[in-house]
Amino acid sequence: MRTITLANGETVEVECLSCALVNGLIEPEGGVVMVTEHFHAHQDVAYPIPGLIILASKRHLKSLDELTEEERIDYITVLAEIRKAQRNVLGIESVYYFYNEDTTHHFHTWMVPR
């Protein structure tokens, strides 16, 4: 179990944070941004920075090359839709994309406003 401190100061114990988010056991401060068959998009539960989005796979996998073809198409489609909304709704002109493979749970990408 992991202890996570949420943005509101509450602490929760979870086996897997992404599973808890995907299954609705934890509600991110800014709410859920988007859900598809394969992905879940939300604000960071600890640092709800406006416009910062985490796009996470619903299933446990570690690396981009582990995505199925259907998941890859869903991933890039959702990533582009969120990026368009960041620009058109929030006026965010540039973002940093962070993706690393040192996680033991869900493949995810941070979309951080610059």
Image (cartoon, rainbow, N blue to C red):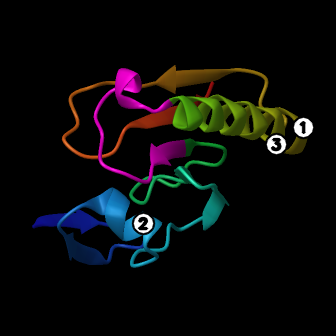
Task: Reply yes or no: does residue 61 show up in magenta.
Answer: yes
Query: Depth check: 38 or 79 in front?
Result: 38
Q: Which residue is denoted by mark 1 in the rendering?
A: 88
In this view, 23 is above or below 101: below
Residue 5 location in percent, x, y? Answer: 27, 66
Indicate the amino acid at tag 2: Leu
Residue 21 is tagged as 2
Q: Does residue 6 appear anywhere in the picture?
A: no
Q: What stretch is highlighted in magenta?
A: 54-68
The residue sitting at 53% across, 50% down in the picture is 38
Packing grade of label 3 (10 A; few <14, some 14-19, many >=20) is: few
Task: Reply yes or no: does residue 41 show up in magenta.
Answer: no
Q: Which of marks 2 and 3 is nearer the N terminus?
A: 2
Label 2: which secondary element:
helix
Residue 90 is tagged as 3
Query: Depth check: 77 or 1 in front?
Result: 77
Q: Does residue 83 appear anywhere in the picture?
A: yes
Q: Is residue 2 left or right of residue 30?
A: left
Residue 70 location in percent, x, y? Answer: 58, 36
Q: In this view, does 76 lie to the left or right of 91?
A: left
Q: Which of marks 1 and 2 is nearer the N terminus?
A: 2
Residue 79 is tagged as none
Indicate the amino acid at tag 1: Asn
The residue sitting at 30% across, 48% down in the picture is 60
Query: Depth check: 112 or 18 in front?
Result: 18
Q: In this view, does 114 lie to the left or right of 71?
A: right
